[in-house]
Amino acid sequence: MSGHSKWSTIKRKKGAADAKRGQMFTKMGRELAIAAREGGPDSEANFKLRMVIDKAKSVSMPKENIERAIRRGAGLEKGDVLEQLTYEGYGPGGVAFLVQVVTDNKNRAVSEVRRYFTRHGGNLGEAGCVAWLFASRGVITAQTGNKDADALFEMAVEAGAEDVQVDEDTVEIYTIPEDLQPVRMTLEKSGLVIESAHMSMVPSTLAQLDDKVALQAMSLIEELEDLDDVQAVYSNLDISDELMAKYEAA
């Protein structure tokens, strides 16, 4: 799971440019609408919606934008008809990719995703070609505070976590999907400061590539994430500390 943890870390360090704020809000609006459509507009009864609202607030999305997206998703206000899609494929070096999309134009979405794969020497595959490598997991990111790695690991496991990754000032805690909320609540009661809690697709095995090809794969991930229709990109690329340093310096 280290690839997921390290990629998440560098994305947090890089942050979001102001120029991309509008795009970020568009993506968050679609995610809110889908969550409200699937589970209803009541965030107290819809945990997925509650998580997305927290995520939207963390990127300073205005309250009125959040509420409008929820109303549209629940059918209380007119809006675009959105589709959820997942594309599978292979990136540089044969790295497995899952690309989750929410779009109002399926043809545009698949065309753009395919174009980026082709540009980086990869290709889209048939449904199911790489999905078997990934499992749905809850991911909780929290501040380490003054706790050491052993104490954090013990706390998380006692709360019901499946795995723990400690990285400098943050800790990522993995759970099975149905345990995400109870584990989060237990950790909060224990005094851990939660930064985010969300569902993710975690690879069962990681692919190790030489630095040149791995950097190409990382570029593909970042470019796909910048597409308006793309909500999330998952891969099984193994990212070493040395490679991360090169990427940060680029």
Image (cartoon, grey):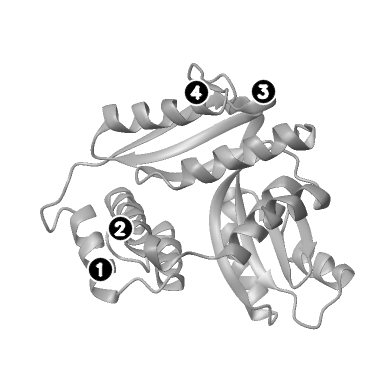
**What is the crowding at mark 2: few (fewer than 14 residues within 10 Å), some, or many (at least 20)?**
many
Tags 4 and 3 touching, CB below 8 Å: no
Q: Quadrant of residue 173?
A: bottom right
Amino acid at the residue labelled 2: Gly
Q: Return the residue nearer the eye: 100 or 162.
A: 100
* 50 with respect to 63 (left or right): right
Rounded to the nearest whole Å, what is the CA distance between mark 1 and mark 3? 40 Å
Q: Return the residue nearer the eye: 207 or 195.
A: 207
Tags 2 and 1 touching, CB below 8 Å: yes
Q: Nearer the viewer, mark 4 or mark 1?
A: 4
> Is residue 176 something that shows in the picture?
yes
Point out residue 219 in the picture as x, y percentages from the top left corner. 59, 41
Identity of the residue drawn at 81% across and 52% down: 241
Q: Which residue is mark 4?
A: 118
Sooner in the amino-acid sequence: mark 4 or mark 1: 1
Amino acid at the residue labelled 4: Thr
Q: Which residue is mark 1?
A: 65
Q: Which structural element holds mark 4?
A: helix
Rounded to the nearest whole Å, what is the CA distance between mark 4 and mark 3? 13 Å
Q: Nearer the viewer, mark 3 or mark 2?
A: 3
> Is residue 204 something that shows in the picture?
no
